[in-house]
Every structure is written in structure tokens, then in C-alpha cells.
Image (cartoon, coloured by chain):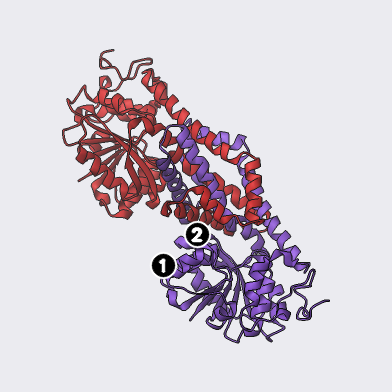
Chain colours: A red, B purple
Amino acid sequence: MSVGFIGAGQLVHALVKGFSAAGVIATHRITASSPETGLSTATRLRKMGVNLTTSNKETVKSSDVLFLAVKPHIIPFVLDEIGPDIEERHLIVSCAAGVTISSIEKKLLQHQSAPKVMRCMTNTPVMVREGATVYATGMHADLEDGKLLEQLMSSVGYCTEVEEDLIDAVTGLSGSGPAYAFTAVDALADGGVKMGLPRRLAVRLGAQALLGAARMLLDSEEHPGQLKDNVASPGGATIHALHVMESGGFRSLLINAVEASCIRTRELQHLADQEKISAAAIKKTTLKKVLQQPGVSGTGVTVRTGISLNSPSSKHK
Amino acid sequence: MSVGFIGAGQLAHALVKGFTAAGVIAAHRITASSPDTNLPTVAELRKMGVNFTISNKEATHKSDVLFLAVKPHIIPFVLDEIGPDIEDRHLIVSCAAGVTISSIEKKLLQYRADPKVMRCMTNTPVVVREGATVYATGTHAEVEDGKLLEQLMASVGFCTEVEEDLIDAVTGLSGSGPAYAFTALDALADGGVKMGLPRRLAVRLGAQALLGAAKMLLDSEEHPGELKDQVCSPGGASIHALHLLESGGFRSLLINAVEASCIRTRELQFLADQEKISPAAIKKTTLDKVLQQPGISATSVATKNRVNLFNNRSGVKKV
């Protein structure tokens, strides 16, 4: 089995690193493409033994499972470009936040009668094989396709199937979650340093405390509140600290964060569904590189402003 | 080597669970003592094959490394009780927040010329072998004693030696840290549930996201800010969320928390050093059980009001 990635950025790098550490697939059976050869992640992918190309079409030809790992607004361009090259064996897995399975199927149906499409939301800790992934299955993808994806993604962390309408909420929680955690550790370390600890030790202890607590919760049947109670001894240091957190509305800030990320995801999806992506969303230099690929014609990739990109008639200007 | 625990509560339970999972010591070579047999952790310890006793003296006799895992204000009573039973081989490791090595040494010097004392601050994730532990070494403990403790504690997570004056700050950060994390996870799950996720899935995803991020940070040379940048794509969902966190002073709340826990720890230490612990701090029923132990006399355990507990003359009752 070969795996391809359209895109060679952070997510691709993280997934490849995780997959190869897990041993589920050898790097030489992985192809990644990007018109942007200057990306630092592209260099790292090359070093890992991944086949790197500037041609998305080449990636499609070299793969069975094809991950779409580009930014949401790029997806329509990519689908137009690779549509003609999709074959029956291909399983298309979109990782783009807010891009619906039906919008992808709609585009691919111009080229294939039963495109196998899945959608997943993962996160960067797949890099250390502790990712959190959910996926939803499109109309023409089978149970086995789901199992295959689950096998791949389970090798790099937690993975479960969900109904597609939950994916935006998952984005807000575990998709963006690592960013909340990095911010928290930075702040905890600041607290430690304020009270006299050297920075390195403070970062280490803060991250270790979070990791240990998360591990305890995952391994336990108990409610997080119960585990919190177990740590907070009467009149002790911990309950004093908890009080100041509650006074500042700590919990509320985190609920706000999950909500904001989820809402923004839905916003991006809505903008895409409105089918009015400005071609200014894609750099002219990038577009030029794409157009220079063999097999890609100007009519295969829409370049005019205000064109409906997801409409079946997009080929006809 | 045998390990003993004075105290059979949350911490003793967590350490025993971690040590036995790590295979560094067999449960039958561990003894734990507490006058309170009703604690739920006591039943768990028994189930694990630990020797449980109500006699602190017995736990002392049966161990080489002796952890003091009781609340800070109980420490003086315990030291008075077991002081006469400490031998050359004993390594005393206090886990009590805010109790200084020198206060313990002072007490034990009534009974021995060179008591080997160490102090550690650990946390409950030792139970899943992902603890964070620091320790400081007392006047008479050797480098080998430090290495022995480090070996034990490293089997259940991160462990490093520090200067004793950093331990209160560590308490504020990684000692209390899991409580901050559990609170955060509860809130993150609430957020997920608000946006439509089932509770179980929300808890699972939140915990997995924190775990993964923490692991990335530990495995990386990069600054947390750098890792945060990498997750935040331009105009994307994450940066929108982060803005709200910053607007609400999220970072500041965490700094406040670490500070508050550290300050409270120092307060507790100060109260103890003032040497004015009221015996009202210990339950009469508990004290009664302790006094019923063979070898314990009323004079060896201070029972009157306002007795100076850390004073060398505490064996003499004030009347």
C-alpha cells in the first residue's frame, strides 16, 4: 500500500514522522507534493526518505491512500487538478478543517462515478504518536476503507469514527487543543520561574505534570473532578491555587476557546460552501508552478475571480 | 531492600502502585502504616499485597527506606514516635509539603548522631508512572542515598535533585499541577459538549490533546511558544481561540495558581517552624490508637496545648 500527501507542511510532516516511527509504512512508499519547494518541512520530509515532488498528479499516481493536507481554500484547486487522475483504488482522505465530504464528492463526481472520500480531523501530536483523530466516512467509501484509515491513524494515537457533523467541535477541542496546552505550559513555567525555578526545570516540570495528569485521566474511570479532589488536600497548597483559578474564570476561558475555534471552523466551511473563493487566495507564483506541471491545463484550474469553484459547470467559464 | 511508608493515604497508594508496576520492588517488601484502617486506600494497598499495620514502629522496623507520607502537621508526632527505632541503615524520605530537612534532622538528632534524611516533592501521576519528582539531600545522607532514591523515583516518572529552597516552588508547579490539569480537562470537555460532542468523547479528546502536546514539548528542544505558533495556521480556528484565552488573562491565572500554591506551602512551613502546633490538629481518636501501640508512652508524644514540638526538650511535658 502506498500513501500520498497533497501538501508538505506541518501536518504532513507530523503524520509521516508518526507513521514511520510506528512502522506502519516505510517512508519510500510515501509521496508528498507541494509546488513550494522552500518549505522547511519539505526538506525534513526528504531527509526522512519520502518521495517529494512538485507535481500533485504524480503523487496521485503513486498512491492508494491520498491525504489532502493543504489549507481549506486550496482544496478546490487541488481537486480540479487531480480529479482526472483519480482511479477506483484511491481513497481520498481530507484533513482540511471545515471542508465537507459532500463538497469534495461533488467536485470529484465530475470525473468519477463513485469517488471514495473520507474526512478526518487530527492534530500535531501524531508526530510523537499521541495524536487525537476522528474521521467520517463518505457515501462511496466502504467499511474496509474506514478500517484501513483507522488502522493508520491508530498507529499514531487515539482514533475513532464520528458523525461528520461533530468534526467542527472536535476541531475546537483536540484540533486546537495542543495550542491551548503549549500556552498553558509557557504560563506555568513563568509561574515557576517567578517563584525561583530555573526556566528549563520549570518547563520540564510543567509539561510533565500535564502529561501525568492527562495519562491518569485516560487510564481512569473517574471523573476529572474526582481526580482533582484527590489532589487537593484540606487547607493545602493546591486548593489555595484552585481558588485563584476559579476566581479568574479559568474554566470559562477554556470553554470560550473551544467554542471560538469551532465557530471559526464553521465560518471557514460556510465561506467555502458559498463557492466564492477569490483566486487572490492562491499566490500567483504558486499557481504558475502548478500550471507548469505536465497534464495541467489552464481550463483544469480556475484562475478567474469570482468563479464558482464547486459548481459542476466550473470548467466552462 | 525494603520500603516503608508512614501513612497509607493517596500518596502512599500512588507510589506503591507505581513502584510495583515498574517492578522496582515487590509489594511484599513494602510495609505501610496508619492508625486509620478505614481509609479506602488502605484496602487498595492490602489488595496489592503490601504489609499493612497500624503500628508506625513496625513499619520502621521492617524498612530500609522509610517514606514519611503523612500530612505536614502530623510529622512531628510521627518523628517522636519512631525516633527511638531509627537505625544506621534507615534512609528517611519526607514527602510532606513545607517540612524542612533541618526540622526533621533536629528532631531525630535526639535519638541518633547522624540521621539520614532526604526530602522530596512528588505528585500523584506516579500512579501511572508519569510523576514529577524533585528531592533534596540532608546533612548526613550520602550521594549513594540520593542515587537510591533517584532510582526509585525515576521508575515512576521524571526525577531530579534540587536545592532544598526550590522545593516550595516545585510544589506550586508540579505538585499541584495535576489539579490545574484536571480542572482544565473538565472545562475543555464542557466546551466540547457545548459544541455538540458526547461527554465521554469530549473527555477523551481533551485528555489526549493535552497528553500529546505535553509529550511533544518534552521530546522537543523547541520553545512552547514555537510549538504554539506551528499549530496556529493563518486566520484559522486555533488563533481565534487563542485570542480569547489571552483576552481573559489565561496565562496570568496559571501564574497566579503556581504562586498561590507556593506561598501557601511556605505558610505551612512557617507555621510548623513556629513550633506552635496545637494538638487539636490531631484527632483524639487517632491519637488514642497511636498511644495504644506497644512501646509508645504518653511522654514520647506531646499532648498538651502549645508544646514546642520541634524543641529538643519535647520529651519533657510542660505542666
**Residue A196 appears in which quarter of the rendering?**
bottom right
The quadrant in which residue B206 appears is top left
Q: Which residue is mark 2?
A: B125
- Pointer 1 chain: B
Q: Position of residue B215 (x, y in %)?
A: 45, 53
Identify the mark nearer the N-term, 1 or 2.
Answer: 1
Relative to A8, is A231 above or below?
below
Give the vertical position of B20 relative to A297 (above or below).
below
Q: Report the side of B6 relative to A48 (left or right).
A: right
| Identity of the residue drawn at 54% across and 81% down | B64
Determine if marks 1 and 2 fall on one subunit: yes
Amino acid carrying mark 1 in the image? Ala
Chain letter of disc 2 in the image: B
Q: Are marks 1 and 2 in contact (CB under 8 Å)?
A: no
Q: Is residue B287 visible?
A: yes
Which residue is depicted at the point 66% across and 71% down?
Answer: B287
Quadrant occupied by the C terminus of chain B: bottom right
In percent of width and height, residue B26 lies at: 42, 75
For label 1, the crowd category at 10 Å Cα-Cα, with few meaning under 14, some 14 to 19 and many 20 or more, is some
- The residue to which callout 1 is attached is B21
Residue B33 screen position, x and y as percent: 55, 73
Closest to the observer: B165 or A161? A161
